[in-house]
Amino acid sequence: MSAPAEKLTAAHAEVKAEITRTDTKTGLLLAFIGAVLAGAWSVARDLPLNLAAYLAGGLGLMLLVAAAGLMLRSTRPNLRGRHGFPLWATLTAEEITTTLSGGNLAADVAALSRLAVVKFTALRRAVDLTMTGGALLITAVLLALGGAA
């Protein structure tokens, strides 16, 4: 295999690995948000909440739900046939042979890289929303325990 072909193959593997890592992080963050939402519900039932705590907590919960929605959207399967299994289902036998021989590897690296950037961006926004939502939930608890001044 030539040096450019080896670099192209390595780039392809790297992009696919980054997509896998992003999907794994997304799954972990979704589980964390689910646990925070369940915990917030349990705590909110037991605390005497004032209006400020309701508002801060409600906004925090809305941000967490928005973050979960962003993550679910980023991991939604793409069945339009661009990458992976759906791609194979749309190709003829000759096209599959061409694809597997590396004929379209550069185009696949470019397309997968664009997909990775979309996933990274959604995950980054979801993390920002999660941190902001968590801070608002903490604020709500402090307002409920200490009362609004």
Image (cartoon, rainbow, N blue to C red):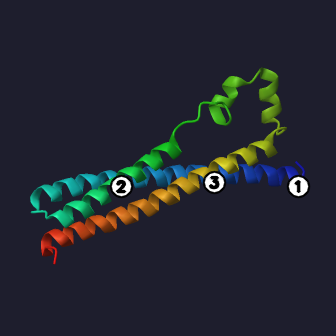
Q: Which of the two marks, 3 or 1, is nearer to us in this view?
A: 3
Residue 149 position (above or below residue 107): below
Q: What element carries label 1?
A: helix
In the drawing, what numbered circle is on residue 64?
2
Q: Position of residue 88 (x, y in %)?
A: 69, 28
Name the kind of residue labelled 3 in the image: Val
Tell me which numbered mark, 3 or 1, is placed earlier along the sequence: 1
Inter-mark Cα distance, 3 to 1: 26 Å
Q: Which of label 3 and label 2 is nearer to you? A: 2
CA–CA distance between discs 1 and 2?
Answer: 47 Å
Furthest residue in direction top, as rendered: 92
Mark earlier in primary sequence (1, 2): 1
Instruction: Report which quarter residue 55 is drawn in.
Output: bottom left
Which is in the foreground here, disc 1 or disc 2?
A: 2
Q: Residues within 10 Å of mark 2 (few under 14, many from 20)?
A: many
Q: How crowded is mark 3: few (under 14 residues within 10 Å), some or many (20 or more)?
A: some
Residue placed at 16% from the left, 59% from the top? 43
Foreground: 35 or 60?
60
Residue 40 picture location, percent across and down: 23, 57
Q: On the image, numbered disc 3 is attached to which residue? A: 117
Identify the mark nearer the N-term, 3 or 2.
2
